[in-house]
Every structure is written in structure tokens, then in C-alpha cells.
Image: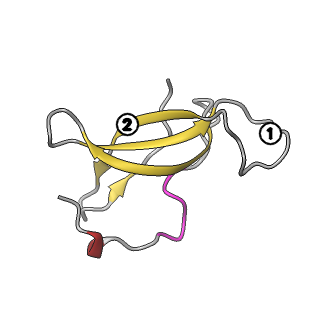
Amino acid sequence: MLDLASWTKSAQPGLRSCYDHGVYGPGHNSFTYAEDDDTVMLVYHARTYTEIVGDPLWNPDRHTFVKPLRWDEQGMPVFSRPSTY
């Protein structure tokens, strides 16, 4: 179970654009469990293109991505690079 009291804000964003995988502007994430009821899954949205016309905060055609969340030796989440399709 995730403990809210153990979370603090990082100085750097957990997810960043990944030009190698063609995933840009990841954000608005949430967490859920996989079907095995053990693996924590990270759910977020991102764009698959770099050029935005208009307000970048109003971008209705982002895609949903899901990937397993890993943990480091100190128990901190390791978000790593956004996944490909």
C-alpha cells in the first residue's frame, strides 16, 4: 500500500519528454495496481508530436500511457523515461 506521508516533492520532474521514444510533455499521472495486485502501474498522458498550436495546457489529443513503476534501494519511485507505444 502506498503511504501518502512518505511522499515529498522532488526538485526535478519525475517524467520528462523522451525524444528517443517520441513521447513529449508527459503529465497528469496516477497510480493503480496491475492484475497481479502487486505491481504498481504508472498511468499518464503525453503527446507523440513536438509542435503545439495554441495553448500548450489545452491539448486535447494526448495519448494515455501505462508502465510498471519500479523502486530504488531507498524505496523511492524510479519513473525512468516514458515508454514507447
Image height of 79 relative to 51, above or below: below
Residue type at mark 2: give it: Lys
- Residue at the image position 40 percent from the left and 50 percent from the top: 30
Q: Position of residue 62 (x, y in %)?
A: 62, 35
Q: Give the magenta range.
A: 10-15
- In the rendered image, the residue lying farthest to the right is 54
- Residue at the image position 29 percent from the left and 45 percent from the top: 32
Res 9 quadrant in image: bottom left
Q: Position of residue 4 (x, y in %)?
A: 29, 70
Q: Secondary structure at mark 2?
A: strand
- Residue at the image position 48 percent from the left and 43 percent from the top: 44
Q: Nearer the viewer, residue 23 or 54?
A: 54
Residue type at mark 1: give it: Ile
Answer with left or right where residue 32 lies relative to residue 57: left
Q: Secondary structure at mark 1?
A: loop
Mark 1: give few (<14), some (14-19) or many (20+) Cα within 10 Å.
few
* Quadrant location, the N terminus: bottom left
Residue identified by numbered label 2: 67
Image height of 14 relative to 18, above or below: below
Q: Position of residue 70 (x, y in %)?
A: 30, 47
The dominant secondary structure in magenta is: loop
Q: Position of residue 61 (x, y in %)?
A: 66, 32
Residue identified by numbered label 1: 52
